Image (cartoon, rainbow, N blue to C red):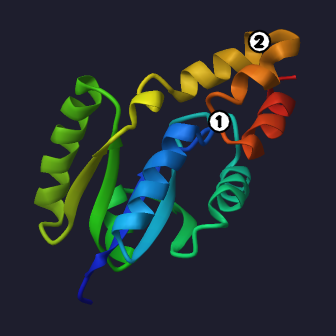
Amino acid sequence: MALNPRHAVCTGSFDPPTLGHLNIIRRGSNICERLTVGIGINPDKTPLFTPDERLSILRSIVDELGNVEVKCFHGLAVDFVQECGAAVMLRGVRSLTDMEAEFTMTLANHMLCPEVETVFLMASENYTHISSTLIKQIAHMGGSRAGEQLERFVPNEVIEPLLEKVR
């Protein structure tokens, strides 16, 4: 099967989805004809949200973007990209540390599937500091103001499910 160079796939754990994720997804949807968001299921990790919860939340967040679909996958991201028929893997990077890890992964992915190109989008400056760990800490320790504080870091659709998880 020929891979579509106008179809990109953006993978991650999205546990939980952040405004940084949404920024990369929106920008990616503007530069490609079709964007698939792939929620990676890693059996070695214990996520806060189940795959179905992450799928539901992400779908509600990207609902307005007509060329974006959301799916879950197991296994290697590069294999998922091929299964989707895409020729582009879209990756968001926040820092030089991210870039170093992404560089190594890109070399490995290129060896596994040279037909898939990796494209990097730098996180917008407002989102370079956001991480899932930070979000979870605010939810756990933010007390009565946690919801108000989380508005700066996650889409509104994430706040209530996140606070329910940590209660």
Q: Is residue 20 visible?
A: yes
Q: Name which quarter of the figure residue 112 lies in.
A: bottom left
Q: Is residue 32 left or right of residue 157?
A: left
Neighbour class for label 2 at 10 Å: few (<14), some, many (≥20)? some
Q: Label 1: which residue?
A: 154
Which amino acid type is shown beneath numbered disc 2?
Gly
Q: Nearer the viewer, residue 81 or 31?
A: 31
Mark 2 touches mark 1? (CB < 8 Å): no
Instruction: Residue at 65%, 67% (x, y): give it.
Output: 64
Instruction: Residue at 17%, 66% (x, y): give it.
Output: 113
**Dot 2 lies on which element?**
loop
Q: What distance separates the C-alpha of mark 2 from that of mark 1?
A: 14 Å
Residue 97: image location, x then y, percent: 26, 24
Q: Is residue 42 visible?
A: no
Neighbour class for label 1 at 10 Å: few (<14), some, many (≥20)? many
Residue 153: image location, x then y, percent: 61, 30
Asked if 25 appears above or below 8 in the picture, the reply is above
Asked if 108 appears above or below 79 in the picture, the reply is above
Instruction: Residue at 11%, 58% (x, y): give it.
Output: 111
Q: Label 2: which residue?
A: 142
Q: Is residue 14 left or right of residue 159?
A: left
Which amino acid type is shown beneath numbered disc 1?
Val
Q: Nearer the viewer, residue 153 or 54?
A: 153
Asked if 127 appears above or below 142 in the picture, the reply is below
Instruction: Residue at 53%, 70% (x, y): give it.
Output: 68
Residue 116: image location, x then y, percent: 20, 67
